[in-house]
Amino acid sequence: MISRKIELFVPTVTPFAGDLSVDATRFVAQAKSLIASGAHGLAPFGSTSEANSLSISERMAALEALNKGGIEPAQMIPGTGCCAAADTIKLSAHATKLGCRGVLMLPPFFYKGVGDEGVFDAYKQVIEAVGPQLRVYLYHIPQMSGVPITLPLIDRLLSRFGDQIAGLKDSSGNWENTANVIAAFPEIDTYSASETMIPENVAAGGAGCISASSNVNPRGIRALIDGLNGPDHDALHLQVSSVRKIFESVPLIPAIKSAVAMQNSDDNFARVRPPFVRSTPEHNEAISKAVRIAGNQTLP
């Protein structure tokens, strides 16, 4: 088994101002807080970040704000996958030029029923356009994208582009698929999307997790990573599992943002862009419970 560092990357929420523009000040503050709370890095502009409700220019400006705000580029794997290749190329080239560790790249996701040949061509177009410095983390979330990242596709991409294919985030929720990816491609970093799977992920040779609820519970998840198979393993796993289970019972992204708002006593963090709507009072008790279990992980 390949020895690798086990890591937590946070797909940090995107705070919005009253006019629903990106609130760069809060974005940077929250990002710094997550790193200070034990996250190894950030994966902004994925699903949890409401990336597909952000324009290309907004994503680029927000990434630059993180960089200027003190987040090391090597700690960031920003999401760059769009339906249009030109947009994916622009975002990926921008992140690569900034020195980011890599990019988390959805396949083109509007047209459904496309086969591996077309998805391979889409990735090939981007990788060849950006150049050899690009490092791609494939983003498998078929329940949202409708376009799976299959094992034959990964194999073909690795055969063609080698170490430019750096890893994969499996957000399918299917542990069997994650295990199959890890077993078939031990040379890449495979992340689970739930912290509850960290023990299985690590035991199989995976790289850790990129989890929405890590916005609320970074310390707990980092403690689990650091304490795997130690004397407190069961208690640490129960803590992260309890928080995660609550968020799986409520509208995920609005609830995560409401929890971050509670932790920071700052309701501005709870704003979402349409088509999302803010968490309703009926979910306050569950969200408050998750915050209590996670602890008061506030901005410094």
Image (cartoon, grey):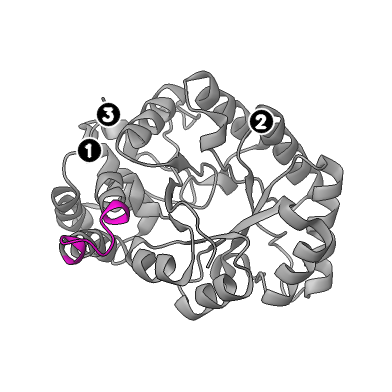
- Residue 279 appears in the figure: no
Residue indicated by mark 2: 57
Q: Amino acid at mark 3?
A: Leu
The answer to which quarter of the image holds residue 90 is top right
The disc label shown at residue 219, or none = none
The disc label shown at residue 299, or none = 3
Image-based side of 183 in relation to 120, left or right:
left
Are the residues flagged by discs 3 and 2 in contact, CB closer than 8 Å? no
Are the residues flagged by discs 1 and 3 in contact, CB closer than 8 Å? no
Residue indicated by mark 1: 297
Nearest to the observer: residue 148 or residue 195: 195
Q: Residues within 10 Å of mark 1 (few under 14, many from 20)?
A: many
Q: Amino acid at mark 1?
A: Gln
Q: Position of residue 110 (x, y in %)?
A: 70, 62
Q: Label 2's element?
A: helix
- Residue with the most extreme top position: 68
Q: Residues within 10 Å of mark 2 (few under 14, many from 20)?
A: few
Q: Position of residue 146 (x, y in %)?
A: 63, 70
Q: Label 3's element?
A: loop
Q: Residue at x 16, y 60 (%)?
A: 232
Q: Residue at x 42, y 21 (%)?
A: 25
Q: Position of residue 213 (x, y in %)?
A: 34, 53
Question: Which comes sooner in the sequence, label 2 or label 1?
Answer: 2
Whether residue 200 is in magenta: the answer is no
For the residues labelled 1 and 3, the Cα–Cα distance comes to: 7 Å
- Residue 68 appears in the figure: yes
Whether residue 225 is in magenta: the answer is yes
Question: Which comes sooner in the sequence, label 3 or label 2?
Answer: 2
Image-based side of 42 in relation to 221, left or right:
right
